[in-house]
Image (cartoon, rainbow, N blue to C red):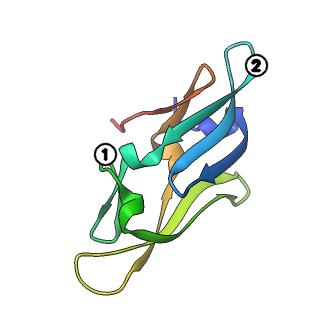
Amino acid sequence: MGNFHESSSDIYLEDGHILVARCNDADGEPQESRLDLDYYIGNNDGSFEWGGESFSSSASDISFGLEGDYSVPVLRAFLNPYDGDPVEANVNLAECIGNDNGTLVYVPSQ
């Protein structure tokens, strides 16, 4: 159920942590959907971590884009590690975000 971006349009990030998209439902009709990534992504010593939470509270320069030939949905930020300067990090949101009949959903990796 991953690869939400393949059945969605107008994908963007709101307030640095809310993923917004128009996701096609089972009939192919676009439905606006929002998913707060802070409930599903954390910061583990300067790296994004699925199953964590509140990454945005320890991040700066948060951005989102569809990258490369396959328009991979990538979240980027500088994350604060336990010690030292912020570290540049990125995560492919298609790894654990899906489109369930027009709704963005978190799909834990198996």
Sequence-wise, the earlier of marks 1 and 2 is 2
| Three-letter code, disc 2 | Gly
Q: Residue at x 51, y 38 (%)?
A: 35
Q: Where is residue 49 shown, x and y percent of the image?
A: 34, 55
Image quarter (top left, top right, bottom left or bottom right) of the C terminus: top left
Q: Where is residue 84 shown, x and y percent of the image?
A: 28, 86
Q: Is residue 107 left or right of residue 103?
A: left
Residue 63: quarter of image: bottom right
- Of all residues shown, which one is farthest toward the top? 27
Q: Residue at x 67, y 19 (%)?
A: 25
- Of all residues shown, which one is farthest toward the front? 15
Q: Where is residue 72 shown, x and y percent of the image?
A: 63, 53
The secondary element bearing badge 1 is classed as: loop
Q: Residues within 10 Å of mark 1 (few under 14, many from 20)?
A: some
| Three-letter code, disc 1 | Gly
Name the residue that disc number 2 marks.
Answer: 28
User: In the rendered view, would you say 23 is above or below 25?
Assistant: below
Front in this rendered view, residue 14 or 40: 14
Residue 29: quarter of image: top right
The secondary element bearing badge 2 is classed as: loop
Counting the numbered discs, the total is 2
Name the residue that disc number 1 marks.
Answer: 51
Q: Residue at x 60, y 51 (%)?
A: 14
